[in-house]
Image: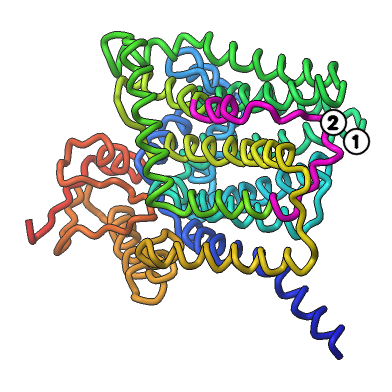
Amino acid sequence: MKDRKKSVISMAISMLPIVISMIVIVPIIIYSVNSLPAADDFTNAISQSEYWERYSSRLVGSLRMIYDSYRTVSGPFYAVMINYLCTPFLRWGIVGIRVFNMLSNILFFLSVYFFIRVFFKHILNQEPELYRWFFCGFVVMVVNGFCNSEVYTWYCVQAGYVIPLSTLFITMGLYVYSVTKKKKMYICTSVFAFLLGGSSLNLAALSCGILFLFGVYSWFYLKRKKESLTIFIAALIGTIVNLASPGNYSRHDYVSEGYNVAGTLKNSCMYVFSTLKNRIFKSPYGVVCLAFLLLLLIYMDYSKSKMKYRFPLIGLFVVFAGVVIVDFPVMLGYSTDGLPERGILVQDVTIYLLTFLWIIYFTGWIKRQKPRLKFQKKEKCISTAVVLTGVLAVILLRGGIGTFTTAKMITSFFDNSFSSYIDYEESMLDEIMNSSDEDVVITRDKKRELLFIKDPGLSTDPENWVNNGIAKYYGKKSINLIYLEE
């Protein structure tokens, strides 16, 4: 009877991180299933339909549009390929966008789980219970670190950032397989690495940096030189092709008049310092990192590791420098001292990923300094309970779970703000589509907003480019939106 009770408790504890992860992930999926077409979705659909008509072929027209975008707009060919080859809004309307965004978000979380599972199993040689907690912590940090209103429901961001991020985690997982299981997966991994070089420049920088770190480890400690070199060179070639795009420079000249490299580097350093301070004290990041550290101290066995773990402070500098390098191209391209929300997503993933690797390294340094630091089974259970209790206590002391993105999303399902907002935006799009007038006038009492859904972007200015794009998409001349309370 006692054994059965222990088995039930053990199973419940092992499933707890999966339950918490699902509580965080499910609201994201619900929101993505209710996505709305927004801003560039309309103008891109118009441009692509014109290309399809001009070349009398959807495939040829899409490929030509990808080439023209590389030549005149920007270099991220992989992100553009996803955007213009899928085109769910043009093919299947609003339903297409919702299905695409749902699948894209699911793919992202699955890819994170895949990488963490493979890394813990084949590099760290750890049991499932530990990597489940790390997956849970990573998901909690990504979703609740910053309120990304445009990330989860905007097709352009899903195609340009979320899917490439998923590709990065899949690539890292395949990389681990390539260098530990001695399978010839490095060729497939190299193809993914090349495509990652064709992502947005901040994502390309992150990909090259991470693959370089993995390459150093596998070169010196696993002696897999051919695989390491092939994969990194593939990513580097993709990035060079990206940088060589004439569109990168013409777009920068459109956004700004000059290149202030030194000033942008300074702004990037200051911005990263401010962001790290914010994440440590105003998000789950600091608490989750402390929990990661304690769990590794309790459960990780570094006795068989070939690494020396001598320079944790240099590793900490690598974390900071890595985030600066990722933020730098965005700030330089837009000549700003901040980031758009999609840039913040890439920045946060960089912070969490590099911190994850540094904590593993730092824990190894502690274990090397204190080789007798070991925990018995009873002590492990007590220590784990203390860690979880401490995490919960700190969260509650910082303003409560209700301040987190997940809690706000769940609350919106029950207070009717979620469903009423979707109805509000859909009613406007339906009114435009079904109007018999070419010059459509829409009247509403007031403007409504919902933080975690990207709205279509209609403005009270009839000449606004989004209004013009939506009007043209629905075959109208103009759209005039009027709020009676203004």
Q: Amino acid at mark 1?
A: Lys
How many marks do you count on the picture?
2
Residue at position x 45%, y 25% in the image? 324
In what element is the residue under mark 2? helix
Relative image position of residue 233 (x, y in whole percent): 71, 14
Relative image position of residue 113 (x, y in whole percent): 69, 50
The residue identified by callout 2 is 178
Q: Nearer the viewer, residue 183 or 61?
A: 183
Q: Residues within 10 Å of mark 1 (few under 14, many from 20)?
A: few
Q: Is residue 50 above or below residue 1?
A: above
Instruction: Indicate the quadrant where residue 20 lies.
Output: bottom right
Where is the C terminus found, in terms of image quarters? bottom left
Q: Is residue 319 above or below residue 98?
A: above
Magenta segment, which residues? 297-320
314 inside magenta stretch? yes
Residue at position x 66%, y 46% in the image? 112
Relative image position of residue 171 (x, y in whole percent): 72, 34
Q: Is residue 260 above or below residue 73?
A: above
- Residue 181's label in the rendered image is 1
Q: Nearer the viewer, residue 437 or 226?
A: 226
322 inside magenta stretch? no
Q: Please, which residue is most extreme toward the right here? A: 182
Residue at position x 34%, y 74% in the image? 416
Q: Are marks 2 and 1 in contact (CB under 8 Å)?
A: yes
Q: Amino acid at mark 2?
A: Ser
Q: Nearer the viewer, residue 157 or 144?
A: 144
Q: Nearer the viewer, residue 381 or 183?
A: 381
